[in-house]
Image: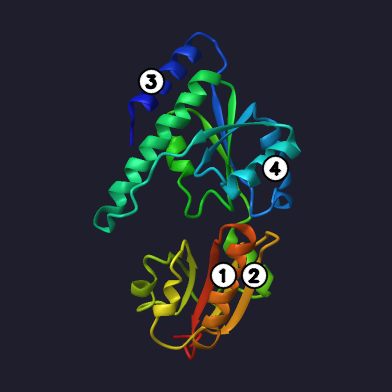
């Protein structure tokens, strides 16, 4: 993917390098799900940033407030840019809608870096490698970048429930709510993310679930048990988390009951 702004930024970077000027850089930093989750490596990377760029999805974006707290603790300036609108209403061309959104983000982020130069940080909820677009967008800008891992929601889910995410020697599929019903036909052990509609409530068969919402936050909620038995408890806990925090982001593990560990 390439946008006019990305091309202009890449050209400027190359010219500056030829002229002996310090090149802009980007640090993509995983920050986990709580300010205390930052690793020593993440704290060092953040301290080396001249500023952090963050997208504001709304006037009361709770995850933006989380990033602001992380920056305040580190004494690093936060530069807020409006997040481009994303078309979520055309499931027939979901990849196209995502590409357009990424291109618009590249334009907005590139404009900030062109204006300010220096080392820009991007703070990624959880871990940058898992269901996050930041690396793809930053890569399209054509400037050097580094990635620092963070504590992901599936890792925190497993720790909270004191479980291993897979059976002995067996595979684990990480998927989304959008794909769950199809993926569950062929897989017995699934971690589900990005599920705003609680797709597991429409799942056929007998499943065990380990569920968590707003993991790592003060509004964290946990439920486990047979899916058919605990769905009402999950729905109630989801509503509580949303009412308390103003948002809800849940992750859960599903394991088919009766599936052989050696099948």
User: Depth-wise, is mark 1 or mark 3 nearer the camera?
Assistant: 1
Q: Which residue is mark 1?
A: 238
Is label 4 in a helix, a strand or a loop? helix
Q: Position of residue 204 (x, y in %)?
A: 38, 84
Asked whether the residues under the numbered discs 2 and 4 touch, taking CB atoms below 8 Å apart as contact, a structural biologist would say: no
Instruction: Say whether residue 168 is visible.
Output: no
* Along the viewing direction, whichever of 103 and 240 lies nearer the viewer: 240
Label 1: how many residues lie within 10 Å, few (<14), some (14-19) or many (20+)? Answer: many
Instruction: Please name which of the two marks, 4 or 3, marks the residue nearer to the observer.
Output: 4
Is 20 situated above or below 145? above
Residue 223, by quadrant, is: bottom right
CA distance for labels 4 and 1:
24 Å
Q: Which residue appears at 45% of the width and 88% of the height?
A: 206
Mark 2 and mark 1 in contact? Answer it, CB < 8 Å: yes
Count neighbours of disc 3 (C-alpha within 10 A) and say few if under 14, some if 14 to 19, many if 20 or more.
some
- Image coordinates for residue 263, horizontal then vertical, percent: 44, 85
Placement of 115 over or under 34, stated as above or below: above
* Sequence-wise first label, 2 or 1: 2
Q: Which residue is mark 4?
A: 69
Name the residue at 54% across, 66% down.
Answer: 251
Using residue 72 as the reference point, say whether residue 201 is left or right of it: left
The local crowd at label 2, few if under 14, some if 14 to 19, many if 20 or more residues have their Cα within 10 Å, is: many
Tell me the CA gap for discs 2 and 1.
8 Å
The residue singled out by tag 2 in the image is 221
Tell me which corner region of the image, top left, top right, bottom left or bottom right, holds residue 179. Answer: bottom left
Q: Earlier in the sequence, mark 4 or mark 3?
A: 3
Where is mark 3, residue-wise?
8
């Amino acid at each position: 993917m390439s946008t006019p702004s990305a091309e202009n930024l890449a050209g400027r970077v190359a010219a500056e390098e030829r002229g002996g000027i310090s090149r802009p850089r980007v640090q993509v930093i995983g920050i986990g799900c709580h300010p205390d989750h930052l690793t020593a490596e993440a704290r060092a990377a953040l301290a080396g940033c001249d500023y952090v760029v963050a997208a504001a999805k709304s006037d009361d974006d709770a995850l933006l407030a989380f990033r602001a707290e992380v920056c305040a603790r580190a004494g690093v300036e936060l530069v807020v840019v409006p997040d481009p609108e994303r078309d979520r209403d055309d499931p027939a061309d979901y990849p196209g809608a995502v590409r357009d959104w990424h291109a618009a983000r590249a334009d907005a982020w590139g404009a900030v870096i062109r204006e300010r130069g220096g080392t820009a940080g991007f703070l990624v909820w959880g871990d940058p490698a898992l269901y996050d677009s930041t690396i793809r967008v930053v890569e399209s800008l054509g400037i050097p970048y580094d990635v620092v891992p963070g504590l992901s929601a599936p890792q925190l889910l497993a720790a909270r429930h004191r479980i291993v995410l897979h059976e002995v020697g067996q595979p684990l599929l990480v998927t989304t709510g959008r794909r769950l019903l199809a993926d569950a036909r062929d897989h017995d052990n699934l971690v589900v993310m990005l599920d705003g509609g609680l797709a597991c409530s429409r799942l056929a068969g007998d499943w065990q679930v380990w569920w968590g919402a707003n993991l790592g936050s003060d509004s964290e909620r946990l439920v486990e048990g047979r899916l058919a038995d605990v769905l009402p408890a999950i729905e109630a806990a989801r509503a509580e988390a949303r009412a308390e925090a103003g948002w809800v982001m849940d992750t859960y593990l599903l394991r088919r009951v009766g599936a052989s560990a050696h099948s």
